[in-house]
Amino acid sequence: MKQSINNTVAIKMSNISKVFETQALETHALTNINLIINKGDYVSISGPSGCGKSTLLSLLGLLDMPTSGQYFIEGEDVSKLSLDEAAETRNSKIGFIFQSFNLIDELSVFDNVALPLRYHRDKPNAETIKNRVNECLAQVSMTHRISHKPNQLSGGQQQRIAIARALVTNPAILLVDEPTGNLDSKSGDQVMDVLAKLNDNGTTICMVTHDPRYADMAKIQLKLLDGAILTVPSLQIAN
Amino acid sequence: MNSFFYSLLYSIKQAYKSLQQTPSFVFSVITTMSITLGALLCVLTLAYVMLFKQLPYPDSEYLVKVEHVMSKENEDWSDSSFSYPSLIHLYKNQEVFTDSVMIFYGERNLTSHQEQPRMNTTYVTPQWFEMFNMPLALGRVFTEDEGLDSNIPLAVLSYVTWQEIFDGDTSILGKKIRFRDVSFTVIGVAAHHFIEPELLDINARDSGRKSQVWLTWDFNNMNERGRTAWAGVDASMVFVGKLKTDITKNNAEQLTTPLVNEKWQAGLADQVFFKNWQVTIRLKTIKDAILSGKKNSVLLLLAGVLGLVLIACSNIANLFIARMAQLQKSLAISAAVGAKKAQLFKLLLAESSLLMFASLMIALVFASVGFSVLQQNLAQVFPRVDEVALSTFTLSIAIFFASMFALFFALLGNKMINYRAISQHLHGSGKGVDMQISKKVRYSLIVSQVAIASVLVFGNLSLFSEALKVINEPVGVNTANFVDIDFSTARRPTQEEIDGPVLGTAIKNSLLALPQVEAVSNSQSPLSGFNEWTLTNVATNEHIIPEVKYVDEQYFQLIAQPLLAGDYFTIHDIREGFTGPEGKVDNMVIIINDVLAKYLIPEGHSFDDALGKKVLMGDDELFTVIGIVKGMKMPGASTIPVRAYVPSSVHSINMTVKLKPNQTLSREQVITAVNEVTSLFALFSMKDVAEIHQQLLFSERATAITTGTLALLTILLAALGLYGILSYSTQMRRFEIGTRLALGAKRGDIIKLIVYDNALAVTLGMVISSLVLLGIMVVFNEQLQNIINVSLLPLFLLTLLLISVIAFNACYLPLRTYINKPALYSLRGSE
Ligand SMILES: Nc1ncnc2c1ncn2[C@@H]1O[C@H](COP(=O)(O)OP(=O)(O)O)[C@@H](O)[C@H]1O
Ligand SMILES: [Mg+2]
């Protein structure tokens, strides 16, 4: 297999398919997806409900395994990792931002943000963790709420904490699933501003949204229909 | 009224439908509840029958068992048995009972029967039948003029005897049956449902004894000498009286004591040993007499079962709580369409009632099985088990408990419905509508589950291991391959036989000639029990009552009982007369055990100093101590009593036979061998010593079985319960687990998280259980004295380890669903 190791490529998918088998039924959620995301890109994926957006995002995030095809993150083949290897890669290479924030209620803001570092291969010491957490909270302007519990914060604030958490391990890419879905429009705008600013500073982002207004904010806009990429304006396609 | 009925019916239908959808919930609840209720009903019925139920005899509250307590200067002697002349004297002269009966519990071979079976013969005076209200299948019972000194040999058969020995012969009345050389005329047969009172004193071998035939009093087993021996007490004799209504128990004791005591002291005036002794008459209601000493076992069993109920309740509470969390959504919808709190409660009540009554039906089946298990296996441990049956009592408590449980679980479920969360759900404020039960409730459930389980498992395990320890305790002598064979005289010997060669020796030789036999000792087996004699240390004039056995010159060597000082008996020590000192008057010798030796010598002296000591035994016979043997512990006994061994007589017909390895000996072979020598003797009993050993351990085995079963059930229920609450708890944390996985947690991290998280609750539960156990030990220190010892510590650690392993598995197993699949599976549905 010919493979160009290009150190500007963050993510590369070739011929990725995903089939869900449920009893008598086979759902072809994704068919032959080819995709390259370069470092520093801001990609949005949109499309009608059920077209496969979430499925694609979970494959990108190694939350699920493709039925066939190959997947590289920063040149490393991650198509056939064990569960624990996938966890390690997720931890160091991928930052997740969920529609419902997925903060852990029992943990303070600080501990929520620090959580990925506690699972990190390098076992950073307390000092390093503290510095890094503060750095990330500063990036989302949330340093003043460090010892609050998530349920003491507004939705928009919670999502910003979630963004700080996603940034904490310096991932290769942020995967964002409907980040504004549970927010009012004002908080939504604030969150989108944070993301735009992060991208300006070099963070690679891939975001699923069905809000055309927010999709437009991305530099590259992919449209998904029935499990296939429909339009690829100004995006270079793999092979 | 009608509308109420319809709404009830509607609720039940709804409940049935909703339960149909959760078969695993229904299965778990019904299994747990039916096992528990079954055990509870079984034990409660047993306890009720033993402790509260009226005895099935008329005026039973007036019936008393009379005890004859001999004492010296107010030191009670533990034995409360009658001597024969005291019994007869009381029977003839008492004025405090309207009715009184004498009972003699004996054993005899039925010599008129081909197989000469050994039977439990009970000799009674005529009022016995009326006092215990014996119903008849056939014939009549003894009449008043067939009582004491009438000398009319009559028999009433038990129903089982009639069926099994006489094949239910309907023309049995008037036929003669022969015990030893006396022919009895059968005049009646007891009805099948007669319940015999168990009045014989507790004694592992005889408890649960059932009479096979009732014979007229005069033909009882007591020999001529015993009939006039005021000092010779025998537990086989029982006196029961029906108190006159105007006389209290105390009154009766005060009136009868001098009546018996004066005569008794006069009878023993010429015996130095009994100087300063007296007899006190004590009365016990026959209910207490029947229950004697067995109350604790049933209370213990009750405690064990109540523990089981606690665990089961906490299990089911967990299941209900988890189910409520699941139902929250559909309850919210019901509430949205207008269901009121009361209606939701009614639905819950209908559900729990359905479950409890289904469990109840199965529990009744389990309980009936339990009853027959009790009757067949534990009759020796629990008196009156024959009266245990599904009764109004059982049904009422069954319905009571089922209703209480149904109500309890419905109330609990109702309390778990979070009406605030429901209304939030309805108002669509999606954020944080968290359906899970609070962490505090979950934690306290784990803590209580662990605490209860640890206490119960430990309690049962310690009783179990105590019983096992006793069962496995070595006797200290060799008993393998031994058979205990006793003969009895089938008739009176002819003059020729009396003057002829010694038949005991002849029987011994005929047994020795059998190819299977390695050796024969002319003694009862080491496990066959002892007699009690009075012993006086001549040097100090101190009195002791040791256990005594007649043994021959081979006995100790054969069973390998170690000699600590002196010598074993030799062939020259064996007596030649039939009884007593005949033929050996000048030089009678005795061997004693180390426990008795310590009484004869000053502390710290060597056993050799006991050799040559003189002791007076029984009727003032003088013996010289020639040997000291190491004491042997009877199976099931906690101590080694003082014991003495005296040489047996050449006429003795009690044999202990040692078989060659892997050989067996049948009754027929023994009968044939002996019949070749003489027709005077019938084979009285033949038992493997190993079998006697097992019989002696009966109550320990029963304890081991009961506590072992309870321990297993407890562990099972505790495991189910812990699994239930922890898997629910894990299920509730599914999204959190998914999130952590998404952020890069490995499987090990998640396991650690859940285990650490629950470890605190588990540890707390264990600490509480330790405190509870310590509390129990402090409060019941006296009762538990012989159970509490250092070996309990490792057992307790074992219990904690067991609970920890269960808890760990209960943490780990439910996690597998989440951590062994891609992280997405745990996250799905969270957005
Ligand atoms: N675990 C699954 N099992 C079966 N079918 C699934 C599963 N997950 C998603 N699907 C199906 O795959 C298709 C794509 O789903 P999804 O990626 O969630 O769409 P979107 O996020 O664009 O709404 C849908 O038809 C959906 O029903
Ligand atoms: Mg989606």
Image (tube, rainbow, N blue to C red):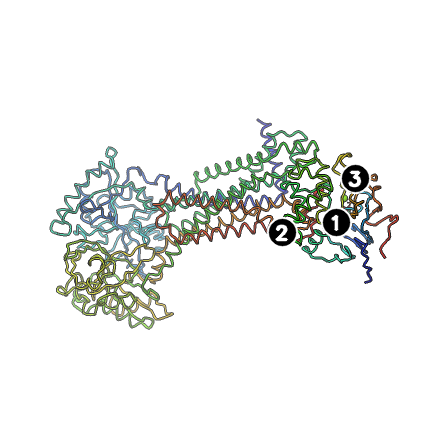
Q: What chain letter is assigned to the residue under label 3?
A: A
Under circle 1, the secondary element is: helix
Dividing the picture into quadrants, the one containing residue B58 is: top left
Q: Earlier along the polypeptide chain: callout 3 or callout 1?
A: 1
In the image, which is nearer the foreground, mark 2 or mark 1?
2
In the image, which is nearer the foreground, mark 3 or mark 2?
3
Q: Residue tagged by mark 3?
A: A193
- Report x, y in % for residue A208: 79, 44
Mark number, residue B392: none
Mark number, residue A58: 1
Which residue is at the front of the view, A90 or B568?
A90
Label 1 C-beta lies within 8 Å of the nearest ligand 1 atom: yes
Q: Which residue lies furthest to the right in this view?
A: A234
Q: Within 10 Å of the Cα at label 2, are there few (<14), some (14-19), or many (20+) other Cα atoms?
A: some
In the image, B494: left or right of B323?
A: left
Q: Are marks 3 and 2 on the same chain?
A: no
Q: Residue tagged by mark 2?
A: B749
For the residue marked with disc 1, what is the amino acid?
A: Ser
In the image, A225: left or right of B46?
A: right
For the residue marked with disc 3, what is the amino acid?
A: Asp
For the residue marked with disc 2, what is the amino acid?
A: Asp
Q: In which quarter of the image is ligand 2?
A: top right
Instruction: Quarter of the image for the N terminus of chain A: give it.
Output: bottom right
